Image (tube, grey):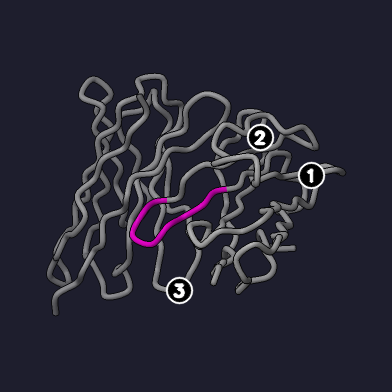
């Protein structure tokens, strides 16, 4: 597609439920990143992939958060046993990688945990 | 540590120049970015500068980098109402990770 797409755009879930957020990067982009943005803040790095390999997951808040990119294209960020503090905008970005580091962001998924 | 600081608000009259400033702490930054976020929209990459450059100009946008002082600025010439948005300064460090500031909300006065 023309840009990074994310689904769903909005997700409301009850505390304790698991959620899966999907990111479809720009075709041909090697690197894929996940960020979380709280209201009034800048995006905060969570994790990133080169192809299917997860290179850095140091930003994942705890072990309830995980991400995968099994075929080096679409990625899924999963949050298990959601808590109210997980409510935020979750943003995905992609880049060509390999020295081309400009990251292009998708529209985000607004997660609300009630 | 890694930190990016920028002022939270800026008001500018339509037609004037806007200058948004940012400081960062990591001297090993490779790229420095400016992103624009309009209400309800995603993050749009406005421009970026390599850390070995001092200046980059792109139409109404001028980016200045003072690497010694770790200071980055974005100048928007002839500011228009459509420039009203939140502008994020960001730096990329090792492993392609980007660190963002909290954003500067630019308000345009008529």
Residue that appears at 47% across and 45% down: A44
Image coordinates of residue B96 in percent, x first then y, are 56, 31
Residue that appears at 56% across and 45% down: A103
Tell me the distance, in whole angstroms, between the alpha carbons under discs 2 and 3. 28 Å
**The N terminus of chain A sits in image quarter:** bottom right
Helix, strand or loop under label 2 = loop
- Circle 1: is it few (<14), some (14-19), or many (20+) Cα within 10 Å? some
Q: Nearer the viewer, residue B81 or A12?
A: A12
- Circle 3: is it few (<14), some (14-19), or many (20+) Cα within 10 Å? few
Q: Which residue is mark 1?
A: A69
- Circle 2: is it few (<14), some (14-19), or many (20+) Cα within 10 Å? some
Stretch in magenta: A35-42
Q: Chain of mark 3?
A: B
Q: Which mark is drawn over residue B17?
A: none
Q: Which mark is drawn over residue A97?
A: 2
Tag in front: 2 or 3:
3
Helix, strand or loop under label 3 = loop
Image coordinates of residue A24 in percent, x first then y, are 74, 57
Above/below status of B105 relative to B97: below
Tell me the distance, in whole angstroms, between the alpha carbons under discs 3 and 1. 27 Å
Q: Which mark is drawn over residue B40?
A: 3
Labels 2 and 3 positioned on one and the same chain: no
**The C terminus of chain A sits in image quarter:** bottom right
């Amino acid at each position: 597609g023309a840009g990074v797409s994310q689904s769903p755009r909005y997700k409301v879930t009850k505390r304790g439920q698991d959620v899966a957020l999907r990111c479809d990067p720009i075709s041909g982009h090697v690197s894929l990143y996940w960020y979380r943005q709280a209201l009034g803040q800048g995006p905060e790095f969570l994790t990133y992939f080169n192809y299917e390999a997860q290179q850095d997951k140091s930003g994942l808040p705890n072990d309830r958060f995980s991400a995968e990119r099994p075929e080096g294209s679409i990625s899924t960020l999963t949050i298990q046993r959601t808590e109210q503090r997980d409510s935020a905008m979750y943003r995905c970005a992609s880049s060509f990688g390999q020295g081309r580091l400009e990251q292009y962001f998708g529209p985000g998924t607004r997660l609300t945990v009630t | 540590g890694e930190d990016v600081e920028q002022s939270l608000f800026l008001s500018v009259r339509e037609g004037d120049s806007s200058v948004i400033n940012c400081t960062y702490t990591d001297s090993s930054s490779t790229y420095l970015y400016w992103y624009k976020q309009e209400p309800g929209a995603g993050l749009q990459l406005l421009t970026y500068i390599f850390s070995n450059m001092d200046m980059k100009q792109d139409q109404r946008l001028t980016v200045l980098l003072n690497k010694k002082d770790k200071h980055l600025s974005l100048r928007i010439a002839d500011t228009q109402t459509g420039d009203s948005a939140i502008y994020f300064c960001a730096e990329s460090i090792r492993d392609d990770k980007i660190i963002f500031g909290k954003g500067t909300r630019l308000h345009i006065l008529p």
